[in-house]
Amino acid sequence: MALSNNVIGAINFVAMLLSIPIIGTGIWLATEPDNSCVKLLQWPVIILGILFLVVAIAGFVGAFWRIPWLLICYLIAMLVLIILLAALVVFIYMVTIRGSGHLEPSRSYLEYHLDDYSGWLRRRVRSPFKWERIRTCLSSTNMCAELNQSYSMAQDFFNAHITPLQSGCCKPPTQCGYTFVNPTYWISPINNAADMDCLNWNNDQTQLCFNCDSCKAGLLANLKKEWRRADIILLITLIALVAVYLIGCCAFRNAKTEDLFRKYKQGYT
């Protein structure tokens, strides 16, 4: 029994360590400017990681002090959390399966279209109330000012590999036919009615294309890239947690078997 409890304690310690990548992933998302403005995924991930940590500590305590009911609660709670983590991994994959950038002639950066992305993500940015808050947050960053500091010549800018957010929010869409002055200041063509984003472009450095659908699409493209990275980490952690959980179940069953066998032997002595 003592050996099995030691094994269970060691397994729970590993589960405690595995909560760190989950919490770390949530914290990383929270530090990214786009995710900090949208505030969709980071807190669920952080909270789930903390719950894994708390449950693993409870299991460790139950094994160390040999508290069977606490170990049973640990096994049930850990199973529920693993199911929740698996659901989150699948959800992130499903909402990020669609959407990619589009090449334009004589441009190295990509253009982004809002309709390319999943309906769930689009609903997060299409509400005027939600977008106003996100727009204000994005426009307060220096991502567009960085372009002016890095590129002064048109060809250098056209050959640049800028982020989806910068492509969608800091310049007008290429199809509008604006003339480059600097990355955030463009001369309007005679006819710019090809798309509503062409009309929404504003050379005011606080406006730019932050009211454009291309900006919303660029945001979703950035989120997709970061969420996919987070999903890979969560998937690897999930696989490790499932393995740890199965080993823990076997160890707990062996401990109960040893306990019953010990009591059986005592009954005949």
Image: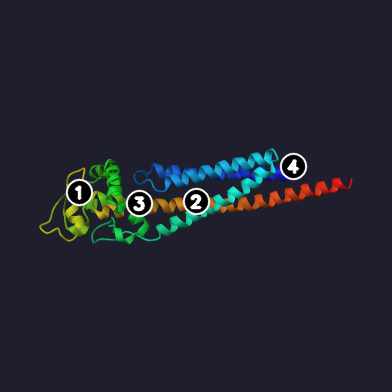
**Quick check: marks 2 and 3 in contact, CB under 8 Å?**
no
Reading the image, the residue beneath label 3 is 222
- The residue drawn where x is 65% and y is 49% is 248
Q: Residues within 10 Å of mark 2 (few under 14, many from 20)?
A: many
**Quick check: marks 1 and 2 in contact, CB under 8 Å?**
no
Reading the image, the residue beneath label 4 is 2
Reading the image, the residue beneath label 2 is 234
Q: Residue 158: x percent and y percent?
A: 24, 54
In this picture, residue 100 sits left or right of residue 250: left
Amino acid at circle 1:
Met
Which callout, 3 or 4, points at the residue further toward the start of the chain? 4
Amino acid at circle 2:
Leu
Disc 1 versus disc 2: distance between alpha carbons?
Answer: 42 Å
Disc 2 versus disc 3: distance between alpha carbons?
Answer: 18 Å
**Residue 83, quarter of the rendered image:** bottom right
In this picture, residue 113 sits left or right of residue 56: left
Which residue of the protein is positioned furthest toward the left in this rendering?
190
Depth order, front residue of 80/149? 80
Which callout, 2 or 3, points at the residue further toward the start of the chain? 3
Which callout, 1 or 2, points at the residue further toward the start of the chain? 1
Amino acid at circle 3:
Asn
- The residue drawn where x is 43% and y is 45% is 42
Label 3 vs label 1, nearer the camera: 3
Disc 4 versus disc 1: distance between alpha carbons?
Answer: 72 Å
Amino acid at circle 4:
Ala
Reading the image, the residue beneath label 1 is 153
Disc 3 versus disc 1: distance between alpha carbons?
Answer: 26 Å
Disc 3 versus disc 4: distance between alpha carbons?
Answer: 51 Å
Label 3 vs label 4, nearer the camera: 4
